[in-house]
Image (cartoon, rainbow, N blue to C red):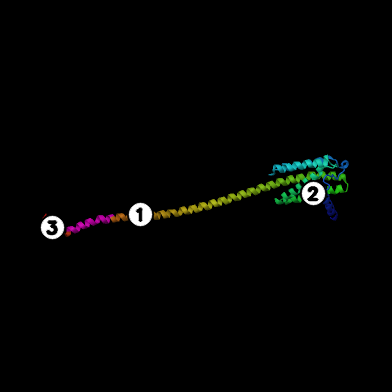
Amino acid sequence: MSYLASKFVDVFLEQMHGMSAGFNLAHLPREHCLHWWSGLSGVLFVLPAFSDNRMTKLGKFFWFLQAALSILADYVFIGRAHPIHGIDRYSATINCFRVLSVGYNASLYRHVYLAIVPLGIHLLARIAKQETAWHLWIFLHGWWHVTAPILIYWMYNDEQILFESKEKLKAAFQTMSKSKEKKTVSRSSSRGRSKTPTKSKSKSKSATVKRSTPKNSERGRSATPSARRSTRKRTGPDRGFFLSE
């Protein structure tokens, strides 16, 4: 463990040097490290751009750029001083942290743990370079170009599936809340409608009472003249009229 820890520190310091003072340096002998497996296999870094992910055009462009930089640095300009080496180091470092952040934010911890495989292969390749084991470096660096894009492609697809499932759950909860609101509104409106007929009935009863009272008053008015006539017949001047007849 102490050996791996010391080698990891050496690789980290070498990476920092390659991104600063040794920006143009290749650190690899061309006559020993020029190979199609370690150089042209970098084209696989375009694979994440074809994932079923909501990736923007700019994000896809960065993966095409990474593939081009990998081929240029590990095959075309390998063993030669060129700024493409420093650009490739910066691009690879940024993409590595970008992918890890996507997996961590999406809670795809399985993919974050599986990232140990390509990162471990890359670390072993850097150790092989320090030990000048060039054939081992070619073998391991080629597998770094294979395992890393496949894992990134897989992670992007799973992240998209997880995102779509979350969106579906949100839509389902929204529809459920809307249906509950509609039910509460319909219940309140139905309760209001059930209360209004009683008011109308009471109003109709009061109207019937009001209508009935004038009739009684009219009857009382119509009854009073006859009563007066009867009283007049019994008493008053009419009685003398009948006697004269």
The residue segment tinted magenta is 218-233
Q: How many angstroms separate mark 3 from mark 2 (CA)?
A: 140 Å
Determine which of the numbered discs, if any, sits on residue 41 in the image.
none
Left or right relative to 98: residue 35: right
Q: How many angstroms separate mark 2 from mark 1 (CA)?
A: 93 Å
Query: Quarter of the image containing the C terminus?
Result: bottom left
Tell me if label 3 and label 1 are in contact, CB under 8 Å: no
Instruction: Check disc 3 and give the amino acid type.
Output: Gly
Q: Residue at x 70, y 51 (%)?
A: 105
Q: Is residue 41 visible?
A: no
Q: Residue at x 45, y 55 (%)?
A: 195
Instruction: Check disc 2 and give the amino acid type.
Output: Leu
| Residue 185 spot, x, y in % from top left | 52, 52
Tag 3 residue:
240
Classed neighbour count for the residue bearing mark 1: other residues with Cα under 10 Å, few (<14), some (14–19), many (≥20): few
Q: Determine whether 130 is above or below 230 in the image.
A: above
Tag 1's secondary structure?
helix
Instruction: Check disc 1 and give the amino acid type.
Output: Thr
Q: Residue at x 17, y 59 (%)?
A: 234
Residue farthest to the bottom?
Answer: 235
Task: Tell me which label, 2 or 1, sits earlier in the chain.
Answer: 2
| Residue 149 spot, x, y in % from top left | 76, 44
| Residue 232 spot, x, y in % from top left | 18, 58
| Residue 191 spot, x, y in % from top left | 48, 54
Q: Residue at x 42, y 55 (%)?
A: 199
Classed neighbour count for the residue bearing mark 3: other residues with Cα under 10 Å, few (<14), some (14–19), many (≥20): few
Q: Determine whether 35 is above or below 111 in the image.
A: above
Tag 1 residue:
208
Task: Tell me which label, 3 or 1, sits earlier in the chain.
Answer: 1
